[in-house]
């Protein structure tokens, strides 16, 4: 259905078709609020808790859209991907629900919790070095061997259309927002957010939140072209990958601004949200809260949606307990 | 309204009146599910997440019912209580919303997170030793000095009627259950659950879950009369207090059974739920999951509501990281 489609070709109907396709396999996650965090930020925050997806991340949306959109013939050889974590386990989860094989290439440094989840869902892991170059080389070998359908973690219109369903729910659940803030790594969630929000709520601003130590999207946005870093280091392990052409389309055309936060600010925001929202969220998911706290004038008095992207955390290694 | 009412006098109309009174001040918390935890237990579990109340515990329901039910004249002198934690901060929260003073007596060993929350909501803390005897003695002095209205953490029909609103929401949100499991300390939540469930869903079984190391309700239930322990020690800090006459009425007449769990089983269940449900819950809230895992034949194949009672945890002192 999405053959020969690029990010630029995606329409709101692709999001709607994705939503119909994946609805039996995902949760319409709840939106939580905290008076305390509202007082602290001066904004009215609406947390869309994608950490409550069964696989613990919004990435099941895109993964399910890709997996359940395959023809019977394509599905037979299974799917394959490379991912720092949540896409790997989400694709394994989606493939498991369809009963087809899933091969994933993961950096050997990926969190143990995420590797464990991939295996629990029946995925097969091949490890690589923690750099984009190594990951792509190892992946080429795996794909050649299996003939599986490649589902890129974010640079895939099927994936972007799936992620776009999240903000459709958020807009409906909240009855409208002044702004949405989501983390940015490769840009899959932000692109899906742009697709939905620019069509259904064009007056709503879209902010991306990125770690200072992996600020390639921030620099790309300022420069007007993609700048890619190989293997940046940040506690927000889901946000290390660079933009690609399909996500750059959305970032360059629809994002209002990109804000960054330091490692300490991310960890502080994570602990703060665990304490007052009482949800288990990943460091990557704390970056939006960190940037909202850091840019009070942008968000004060506004109704702000915050995408809590995932909750797959190693509970034995919490970053504030080092 | 509830003058001269005892536990035995409470009717479902008291619950309904409480719900109408407190609705502007509480959240109708979401019900979460986990395929993983369902597979593990063989049951279909519905987690009613009271940890997502602003004050982080179901106790805001009873506290708000008591505080907002006071006449203007009574309210002027404020409210007072003794509590190991969540009732203290919930009563402070409720009093703060009405703009009246709140005095609480807390054991000096109470978790710092709970003391901090009481102060954040404007409550005044007087510390006592961690025993029922010391707590009651110090409280008598505080009440004599302030003339405040005593709102007992659980042995108060206004409080029980408030807690009863939780399972009314749970029954409606799930469309019916075979069983409900809630932790038992003093018995406020279990009594409210009994009030609602015995009236609205009399075929639904009611199980209480208690730490082995503070198993006074379990022994009371077997003996047929209240047995009180002074100062038992358990990681489930909310469950150390004994039953009293108003809660004993419900426990002795409506509870199907009481199950217990060891300290290690409670901590394991807590970590398991954080990992797979991705919510921050207290040790006390993990006791139901521990007892469900321990009694599979009781719950297998059943639709089971689980009350997640609270989420006020010291994130610097997690019990599995010792």
Image: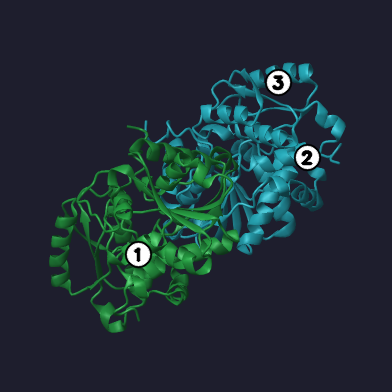
Chain colours: A cyan, B green
Q: Is residue B184 above or below residue A117?
A: below
User: Callout 2: helix, strand or loop?
Assistant: helix
Residue A205 visible in the shown view: yes
Which of these two is toward me, A74 or B235? B235
Q: Is residue A302 visible?
A: no
Mark 1 near mark 2, Cβ–Cβ under 8 Å?
no
- The chain letter under disc 2 is A
Q: Chain of mark 3?
A: A
Would you place residue A172 above or below residue A81 in this image?
Answer: below
Which residue, given by chain and number where applicable, does mark 3 sit on? A139
Whole-number angstrom distance, CA of label 2 to CA of label 3: 22 Å
> Residues at marks 1 and 3, common chain?
no
Q: Nearer the viewer, mark 1 or mark 3?
A: 1
Disc 3 packing (10 Å; few <14; some 14–19; many ≥20): many
| 2 and 3 marks on the same chain | yes
In this view, the mark in front (2 or 3) = 2
Reading the image, the residue beneath label 1 is B93
Residue that extends furthest to the front in the rendered view of this protein = B223
Separation of residues labelled 1 and 3 (CA atoms): 54 Å
The quadrant of the picture occupied by the N terminus of chain A is top right
- The residue that disc 2 covers is A68
């Amino acid at each position: 259905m999405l053959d020969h489609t690029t990010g630029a070709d995606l329409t709101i109907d692709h999001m709607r078709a994705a939503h119909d396709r994946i609805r039996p396999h995902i949760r319409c996650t709840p939106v939580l609020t905290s008076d305390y965090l509202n007082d602290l930020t001066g904004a009215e925050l609406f947390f869309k808790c994608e950490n409550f997806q069964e696989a613990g991340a919004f990435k099941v949306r895109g993964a399910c859209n890709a997996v359940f959109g395959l023809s019977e013939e394509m599905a037979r050889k299974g799917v394959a991907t490379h991912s720092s974590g949540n896409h790997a386990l989400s694709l394994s989860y989606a493939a498991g629900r369809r009963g087809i094989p899933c091969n994933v290439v993961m950096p050997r440094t990926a969190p143990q919790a995420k590797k464990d989840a991939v295996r629990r869902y029946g995925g097969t892991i091949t490890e690589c070095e923690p750099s984009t170059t190594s990951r792509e080389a190892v992946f080429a070998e795996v794909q050649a061997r299996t003939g599986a359908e490649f589902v890129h973690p974010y640079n895939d219109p099927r994936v972007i259309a799936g992620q776009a369903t999240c903000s459709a729910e958020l807009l409906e659940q909240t009855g409208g927002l002044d702004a949405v803030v989501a983390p940015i790594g490769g840009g899959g969630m932000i692109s899906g957010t742009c697709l939905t929000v620019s069509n259904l709520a064009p007056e709503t601003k879209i902010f991306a939140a990125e770690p200072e130590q992996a600020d390639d999207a921030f620099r790309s946005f300022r420069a007007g072209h993609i700048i890619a870093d190989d293997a940046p280091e940040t506690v927000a392990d889901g946000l290390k990958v660079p933009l690609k052409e399909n996500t750059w389309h959305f970032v360059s055309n629809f994002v209002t601004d990109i804000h960054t936060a330091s490692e300490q600010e991310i960890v502080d925001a994570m602990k703060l949200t665990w304490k007052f929202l009482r949800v288990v969220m990943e460091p990557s998911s704390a970056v939006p809260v960190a940037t909202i706290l850091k840019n009070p004038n942008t968000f004060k008095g506004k109704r702000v949606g915050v995408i809590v992207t995932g909750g797959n955390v190693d509970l034995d290694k919490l970053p504030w307990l080092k």
